[in-house]
Amino acid sequence: MNKNISSPFDFDAESVVLGSAILEKKAMPEVAQHLRADMFYYDNHRIIFAALMRMYNGRRDIDLITVADELRRNNELEKVEGPYYITKLCSQVVSTVHLKEHCLIVKELYLRREIIKGLTQLLGTAQDMSMDIADVVCEMQELATRVEKDAVKADNLRNMETLMNDTLTQAKGRIENSTNGVTGTDTGLTDLNKITGGWQRGDLVVIAARPATGKTMFSLFLAQIAAKTGMNAVFFSIEMQGERLGDRFILMESDVNPYRWRTGTTDEREWNEAFSTAESLAELPIIIDDSPSMSMDYIRAQSRMLKSRGKCDIIFIDYLQLSDMKGSVKENRNREQEVATAARKAKLLAKEMDCPVILLSQLNREAENRYGGKPQLSDLRESGAIEQDADIVVMLYRPALYNIPTDKDSGYPTEGLGVLNIAKHRNGETGNVYFSHNKSMTKIGDYVPPMEWLMKQAK
């Protein structure tokens, strides 16, 4: 950074911090907790602090002589004006009583410099008409994120007394908010609610399936259920245009024939019903984003904006492998590493937004090569890191698509049968959940075996 009047700094604060770290044995743990070498304004101060950190991490004694020796061995002593300058730093120290405050001064001025530098660059980017506005917004969000990480003053270190109080407070909240055992967002399926307790805040839920299995329709069902219970749902559709999602919402809520709706051959009764249904759906708190180029950073920026407006309680992303990962190219990552990074960002998004994130994912072809096409965790396409970061992994499976007349696990007939295999559940049990659906997957609900099957079982 150019050292000019617009770059705030405090020479005395930096000097006192470095001098205290050299003179006082108990000072370095405090300093290391708050500062990094790049937070110092002066080059020689950055060099000295980097040397102190090497010595501290290596558990070596720190004093005037050892610090000078460390710098000499790294050919840096002359860069910091020799032993005299180190002695001068130590002479600045009168007391270490206010060391933490001095560290925070250095840190705050660093953050101000970063904001000034970042906003200056953003101003140039915003004035560049060749830049896509979405990229400008993403750069602005990245600046805010970078500064925010260093600016957060919350102390995450808690003793057991504090931890137990916080744990009981959270448990009490679950008890007060529980409705028939559902402590999170209603899933719309009784058996799924029993296993998960509803979608929980901060959880990343991966719903994986082969193409054309119905994962988009199932996620729209989940979004609609969440919205009907008063949750603000945000649906990021990377694959499908918003109007096509609108078609599916209407078909889910009405008795309009899906084929006639798609082919434009609806009769007057169906059109009137569709119109009435659309008016009703318009009142649901669901926001659709169908931007054609959508990265996880873009999704995070939009989610933060909506969260600040109180309009983001649950997030849906359809789907992971289609998200724009061009930001990873400069880091020379392969496709598997890109997907792993995107999955990790989805998990961090769930924690940051403090809401469930439902992330759809493709399965590889291995499932189809297996008899019956039943998916396994190893079928998650391109990255085992998806399994690692997810709190819940749901494998969506429709055995009838593989011409299997009877489900092996349940014995149910497969016509109209959907299977949700909870293959991973970080905080609970795993197992199968069965749901019913029509041929177009526009009607989804709890599974009830047909009467003929029940009568056969009773014999």
Image (tube, grey):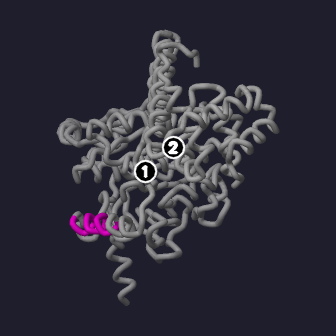
Q: What residue sits 32% from the left and 67% below the top?
A: 165
Of 49 and 85, nearer the camera is 85
The disc, 2 or 1, on the residue closer to the chain's N-terminal end is 2
Q: What residue sits 46% from the left and 65% below the top?
A: 419
Which residue does the numbered mark 2 point to in the structure image? 34
Residue 279 coordinates in the image, percent (x, y): 18, 37
State whether residue 136 is above or below residue 265. above
Q: Is the magenta stretch mostly helix, strand or loop?
A: helix
Which amino acid is tagged 2?
His
Mark in the foreground, 2 or 1: 2
Which amino acid is tagged 1?
Lys
Quadrant (top left, top right, bottom left, bottom right) of the N terminus: top right
Q: Which span is picked out in magenta?
A: 167-176
Residue 395 coordinates in the image, percent (x, y): 51, 60
Can the viewer see residue 192 in this picture? no
Residue 243 coordinates in the image, percent (x, y): 36, 33
Quadrant (top left, top right, bottom left, bottom right) of the C terminus: bottom left
Q: Does the magenta stretch include residue 19?
A: no
- Mark 1 Cα within 10 Å, few/some/many (few <14, many 20+)? some
Q: Does the magenta stretch include residue 169?
A: yes
Q: Which of the numbered marks, if any, corresponds to residue 351?
A: 1
Q: Is mark 1 on a helix, strand or loop?
A: helix
State whether residue 209 is above or below residue 10. below
Q: Are marks 2 and 1 in contact (CB under 8 Å)?
A: no
Q: What residue sits 45% from the left and 68% below the top?
A: 427
Q: Is mark 2 on a helix, strand or loop?
A: helix
State whether residue 57 is above or below residue 235. below
Q: What residue sits 50% from the left and 24% below the top?
A: 9
- Indicate the quadrant where residue 75 lies: top right
